[in-house]
Image (spheres, grey):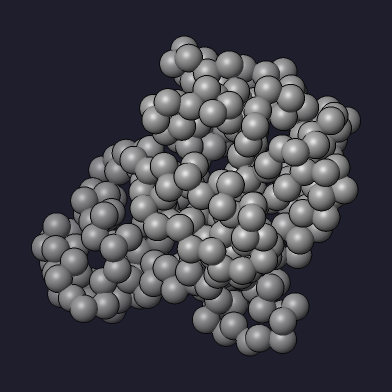
Amino acid sequence: MQVGVAGLGKMGAAIAARLMEVGHQVTVWNRSPDKAKPLADAGAKVADSPAAVAKASEIVITILTDAPAIDTVYGGANGLLSGDVKGKLFLEMSTVRPETQVALAAKVKAKSASLVECPVGGTVGPARQGKLLGLVGAELADFAKVKPLLDQLCRRVEHCGPVGAGESVKLAVNLPLMIAWQAYGEAFAICRHVGFEPKRLVDLFTDISATNNAFKARAPMIATMLEGGDPGPTTFDIASAVKDLKTMRDEGKARGVDLPLIERTLACFEEANAAGLGAQDGAAIPVYWSRRGKK
């Protein structure tokens, strides 16, 4: 299948590489062309605009930073919707407010094309292995068209309802994870006087009923950071977590839902971000908080 990927952040690049690995012909575009080079070296075609990606592809995937980025990539002068896209399918995988996807779906439909939203759970590693969690919002006919492709990217695909429903579920899925990172930091802080070695502390926390899979996967990274070492590549940075927390907060307000834990967790992540940790992995939050105010 001819598949396009517009936007080559960490996740977009990983998804493009996975698609090539399973046999698709992939055309890519990124605002800064240097990010396309590794994929080009592996055999991807590189387009000079989002419009060129749409022209070359049957299905176009986007996974972008926020709503303004979506507006630019889809609606710009050389955007995905600037040419004839009749009959094409757009698979939008960003984490944004549901209303953003609903508005985009209307624009896509006006061009006689289809939109499927599918924000995903998981980071770069699962993306490369085809083990993401896909949360779909789409008409049933459009979902059926894209399901075989999603099965190559995801370990589980949930059709949540019409466009917008996928984002609502994605924000819900992310909510306890963000709070958990802060909770681990506070837990570390109240027992730091005991003096456990980092590996012993982390090993203990991987063996309790409250520990989630994200903590277990990042346990070596957390122990390394507690020891002052280099934890390796970032998979989901704190600055992006701040963006997602703000999205949850705003969605809660729009729906009249109080989210006190998210309000407080956002403030804690913003503090870490302001302290210069924005580019670090979300797993750095427990490390930061365990040292905060330490005499």
* Quadrant of the image containing the C terminus: bottom left
Q: Position of residue 109 (x, y in %)?
A: 82, 50
Residue 67 shown left or right of residue 82 in the figure = left
Above/below status of 270 relative to 261: above
Above/below status of 54 relative to 185: above
Instruction: Tell me which residue sits at (60%, 23%) in the image.
Output: 27
Out of 129 and 59, give the one closest to the viewer.
Answer: 59
Out of 89 and 223, give the one closest to the viewer.
Answer: 89
* Quadrant of the image containing the N terminus: top right
Residue 183 shown left or right of residue 163 in the figure = left
Instruction: Tell me which residue sits at (83%, 44%) in the image.
Output: 112
Q: Position of residue 186 (x, y in %)?
A: 35, 75
The answer to whether residue 293 of the structure is visible from this angle is no
Q: Position of residue 69 (x, y in %)?
A: 73, 44
Instruction: Tell me which residue sits at (32%, 60%) in the image.
Output: 214
Out of 116 and 223, give the one closest to the viewer.
Answer: 116
Instruction: Tell me which residue sits at (30%, 76%) in the image.
Output: 187
Residue 230 shown left or right of residue 101 in the figure = left
The tally of labels here is 0
Indicate the quadrant where residue 36 lies.
top right
The answer to whether residue 154 of the structure is visible from this angle is yes
Out of 49 and 191, give the one closest to the viewer.
Answer: 49
